[in-house]
Protein backbone atom coordinates (compact mmCIF):
# COMPACT_ATOMS: atom_id res chain seq x y z
CA UNK A 1 0.00 0.00 0.00
CA UNK A 2 1.37 3.41 -0.97
CA UNK A 3 2.49 5.66 1.85
CA UNK A 4 -0.12 8.21 2.95
CA UNK A 5 -0.52 11.00 5.50
CA UNK A 6 -0.23 9.77 9.10
CA UNK A 7 -2.68 11.00 11.74
CA UNK A 8 -3.26 10.84 15.48
CA UNK A 9 -7.05 10.46 15.93
CA UNK A 10 -8.34 11.69 19.30
CA UNK A 11 -11.87 11.79 20.73
CA UNK A 12 -12.98 15.05 22.33
CA UNK A 13 -13.20 12.95 25.53
CA UNK A 14 -9.37 12.94 25.46
CA UNK A 15 -8.55 9.36 24.43
CA UNK A 16 -6.67 8.42 21.27
CA UNK A 17 -7.86 5.79 18.80
CA UNK A 18 -5.54 2.82 19.41
CA UNK A 19 -5.06 -0.89 18.92
CA UNK A 20 -4.84 -2.71 22.26
CA UNK A 21 -1.61 -4.47 23.28
CA UNK A 22 -2.93 -7.92 22.25
CA UNK A 23 -3.87 -6.54 18.80
CA UNK A 24 -7.42 -7.88 19.24
CA UNK A 25 -9.57 -4.73 19.60
CA UNK A 26 -9.73 -0.99 19.05
CA UNK A 27 -9.72 1.07 22.25
CA UNK A 28 -9.35 4.58 23.52
CA UNK A 29 -5.87 5.02 25.02
CA UNK A 30 -3.92 7.74 26.81
CA UNK A 31 -2.60 10.03 24.10
CA UNK A 32 0.89 9.26 22.81
CA UNK A 33 1.40 10.35 19.18
CA UNK A 34 4.71 8.44 19.07
CA UNK A 35 2.99 5.12 19.92
CA UNK A 36 2.80 3.07 16.70
CA UNK A 37 -0.56 1.62 17.86
CA UNK A 38 -2.02 5.16 17.70
CA UNK A 39 -0.66 6.18 14.29
CA UNK A 40 -3.23 5.94 11.49
CA UNK A 41 -3.30 6.57 7.77
CA UNK A 42 -6.61 7.60 6.22
CA UNK A 43 -6.76 6.41 2.64
CA UNK A 44 -9.66 7.31 0.36
CA UNK A 45 -11.17 4.26 -1.36
CA UNK A 46 -13.69 5.38 -3.99
CA UNK A 47 -14.40 2.14 -5.88
CA UNK A 48 -14.20 -1.62 -5.36
CA UNK A 49 -12.93 -3.18 -8.62
CA UNK A 50 -13.77 -6.70 -7.38
CA UNK A 51 -17.49 -5.92 -7.02
CA UNK A 52 -17.58 -2.94 -9.40
CA UNK A 53 -19.39 -0.89 -6.74
CA UNK A 54 -18.87 2.64 -5.52
CA UNK A 55 -17.60 2.72 -1.95
CA UNK A 56 -16.76 6.39 -1.34
CA UNK A 57 -15.13 5.42 1.96
CA UNK A 58 -11.91 5.99 3.85
CA UNK A 59 -9.69 3.17 5.12
CA UNK A 60 -8.27 3.83 8.60
CA UNK A 61 -5.00 1.91 8.40
CA UNK A 62 -2.21 1.20 10.90
CA UNK A 63 0.99 0.69 8.92
CA UNK A 64 3.04 -0.53 11.91
CA UNK A 65 0.86 -3.65 12.26
CA UNK A 66 -0.47 -3.75 8.68
CA UNK A 67 -4.03 -3.75 10.06
CA UNK A 68 -7.04 -1.56 9.44
CA UNK A 69 -9.87 -0.46 11.74
CA UNK A 70 -13.38 -1.73 10.97
CA UNK A 71 -16.52 -2.69 12.86
CA UNK A 72 -17.19 -6.38 13.51
CA UNK A 73 -20.61 -5.76 11.94
CA UNK A 74 -22.67 -2.70 11.08
CA UNK A 75 -24.91 -2.91 14.13
CA UNK A 76 -25.31 -0.71 17.21
CA UNK A 77 -22.76 -1.82 19.83
CA UNK A 78 -20.53 -3.72 17.40
CA UNK A 79 -16.89 -3.51 18.51
CA UNK A 80 -14.25 -2.04 16.26
CA UNK A 81 -11.50 -4.49 15.42
CA UNK A 82 -8.01 -4.36 13.93
CA UNK A 83 -8.28 -6.56 10.83
CA UNK A 84 -5.94 -7.91 8.18
CA UNK A 85 -6.26 -6.22 4.83
CA UNK A 86 -8.70 -7.92 2.46
CA UNK A 87 -7.41 -9.60 -0.66
CA UNK A 88 -7.62 -7.76 -3.96
CA UNK A 89 -10.45 -10.13 -4.94
CA UNK A 90 -12.42 -9.05 -1.84
CA UNK A 91 -11.57 -5.36 -1.68
CA UNK A 92 -13.20 -2.87 0.66
CA UNK A 93 -16.93 -2.13 0.95
CA UNK A 94 -19.24 0.38 2.62
CA UNK A 95 -19.22 -1.84 5.73
CA UNK A 96 -15.45 -1.75 6.40
CA UNK A 97 -14.60 1.82 5.42
CA UNK A 98 -15.50 5.17 7.02
CA UNK A 99 -16.96 8.57 6.26
CA UNK A 100 -15.05 11.27 8.10
CA UNK A 101 -17.45 14.16 8.64
CA UNK A 102 -15.52 17.46 8.69
CA UNK A 103 -18.10 19.63 10.49
CA UNK A 104 -18.96 17.39 13.42
CA UNK A 105 -15.88 15.18 13.27
CA UNK A 106 -18.10 12.13 13.43
CA UNK A 107 -16.56 9.04 11.87
CA UNK A 108 -19.33 6.90 10.37
CA UNK A 109 -19.75 3.85 8.17
CA UNK A 110 -20.99 4.68 4.66
CA UNK A 111 -23.51 1.82 4.85
CA UNK A 112 -25.27 3.24 7.94
CA UNK A 113 -24.55 6.89 8.68
CA UNK A 114 -26.77 6.71 11.78
CA UNK A 115 -23.99 4.78 13.52
CA UNK A 116 -20.64 6.33 14.35
CA UNK A 117 -17.34 5.53 16.04
CA UNK A 118 -17.89 5.91 19.78
CA UNK A 119 -15.98 5.42 23.04
CA UNK A 120 -18.45 3.09 24.74
CA UNK A 121 -18.26 2.22 28.42
CA UNK A 122 -21.99 1.49 28.66
CA UNK A 123 -22.81 4.87 30.16
CA UNK A 124 -22.36 8.63 29.91
CA UNK A 125 -18.73 8.66 31.04
CA UNK A 126 -16.11 8.99 32.26
CA UNK A 127 -14.13 7.17 29.58
CA UNK A 128 -10.89 5.80 31.07
CA UNK A 129 -7.98 4.46 28.99
CA UNK A 130 -8.90 1.03 27.65
CA UNK A 131 -12.52 1.99 26.90
CA UNK A 132 -13.72 -0.04 23.89
CA UNK A 133 -14.54 1.77 20.66
CA UNK A 134 -17.81 0.61 19.10
CA UNK A 135 -20.47 1.69 16.66
CA UNK A 136 -23.24 3.63 18.38
CA UNK A 137 -26.09 5.97 17.57
CA UNK A 138 -25.31 9.65 17.14
CA UNK A 139 -26.18 11.64 20.28
CA UNK A 140 -25.59 15.12 18.92
CA UNK A 141 -21.83 15.57 19.36
CA UNK A 142 -20.96 14.20 22.80
CA UNK A 143 -17.21 14.10 23.67
CA UNK A 144 -17.08 10.31 23.25
CA UNK A 145 -18.42 10.43 19.67
CA UNK A 146 -16.56 13.33 18.10
CA UNK A 147 -12.98 13.02 16.91
CA UNK A 148 -10.11 15.16 15.64
CA UNK A 149 -7.42 13.84 13.31
CA UNK A 150 -4.12 15.70 13.77
CA UNK A 151 -1.52 15.36 11.04
CA UNK A 152 1.70 13.74 12.30
CA UNK A 153 3.59 12.96 9.12
CA UNK A 154 3.40 13.64 5.40
CA UNK A 155 4.40 11.06 2.79
CA UNK A 156 7.79 11.55 1.34
Image (tube, rainbow, N blue to C red):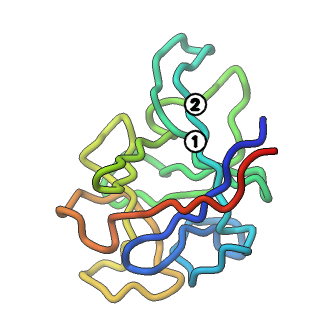
Q: Tell me: 13 left or right of 72.
A: left
| Residue 40 screen position, x and y as percent | 64, 56
Q: Which residue is mark 2?
A: 92
Sooner in the amino-acid sequence: mark 1 or mark 2: 1
Image quadrant in which you'd find residue 142 = bottom left
Residue 1 in view of the camera: no
Q: From this viewpoint, is residue 120 visible?
A: yes
Tell me the distance, in whole angstroms, between the alpha carbons under discs 1 and 2.
8 Å
Q: Residues within 10 Å of mark 1 (few under 14, many from 20)?
A: many
Q: Residue at x 34, y 89 (%)?
A: 126
Q: Is residue 6 left or right of residue 109?
A: right
Label 1 with label 2: CB-CB less than 8 Å: yes
What numbered label is drawn on residue 80? Answer: none
Label placed on residue 59: 1
Residue at 69% in and 20% down: 89
Rendered image quadrant of residue 34:
bottom right
What residue is rendered at 65% in x and 68% in y? 38
Which one is in front in this view, the residue at disc 1 or the one at disc 2?
1
Q: Position of residue 122 (x, y in %)?
A: 31, 78
Q: Quadrant of the C terminus?
A: top right
Amino acid sequence: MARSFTYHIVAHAGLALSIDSTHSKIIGASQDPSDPLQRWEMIFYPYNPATQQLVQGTIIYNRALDLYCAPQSVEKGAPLLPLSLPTLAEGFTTTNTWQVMPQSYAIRTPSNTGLNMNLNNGGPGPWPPGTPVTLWSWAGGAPNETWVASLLEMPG
